[in-house]
Amino acid sequence: MKLAEFWPRYVLAHQKPAMRGLHLIGTLSGLGLWVAAIVRLDWRLLVAGLVVGYGCAWIGHFVVEHNKPATFGHPFLSFASDHKMIFYMLTGQMSAEVERARAAKNR
């Protein structure tokens, strides 16, 4: 499966703003920990980045959206889509993506 095919499914699994907010917090915190790991040359911070990043996202899936994280079935597409979603969130485009995915699903 290609990212273009996967993306609409990913978006529909992240419809609630609280869910996307947890992803934003987790991803940016995880990336910050990875930068700290490189600066400090401490591999434990790499692990902490993964735990924080995925932990926030998975809590959101189980508690907010009540669905299964895409990471389990498509780890690489999920990782790429997460970063695409974060970019769209930071540039104010994500709500439009959700509406586009909803409209396509209802056709």
Image (cartoon, grey):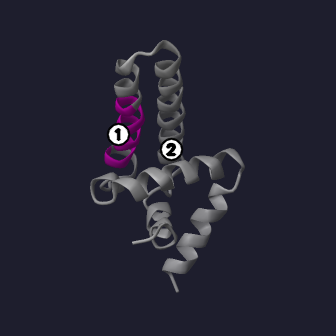
Neighbour class for label 2 at 10 Å: few (<14), some, many (≥20)?
A: few
60 or 46: nearer the eye? Answer: 46
Q: Does the stretch in magenta take in 58?
A: yes
**Residue 30 location (% of width, % of height):** 47, 31
The question of residue 24 being in magenta is answered with no
Q: Which mark is residue 18?
A: 2
- Residue at the image point whose x is 55% and y is 71% from the top: 101
Which element carries disc 1, helix, strand or loop? helix
Q: Amino acid at mark 1?
A: Ile
Using the image as rendered, state which of residue 6 and residue 102 is in the foreground: 6
The residue at the point 37 percent across, 33 percent down is 50
Instruction: Please tell me whether mark 2 sits on a helix, a strand or a loop.
Output: helix
Which residue is at the front of the view, 55 or 47? Answer: 47
Q: Write down the residue under mark 1.
A: 59
Q: Quadrant of residue 63?
A: top left
Q: Residue at x 48, y 42 (%)?
A: 23
Indicate the position of residue 104 as horizontal and vertical percent values. Answer: 54, 79
Mark 1, mark 2: which one is toward the viewer?
1
How many numbered marks have been drawn onto this rendered protein structure? Answer: 2
Q: Which residues are magenta?
A: 50-62
**Which quarter of the rendering shows the N terminus?**
bottom left
Query: Does residue 98 lie above or below 58 as drawn?
Result: below
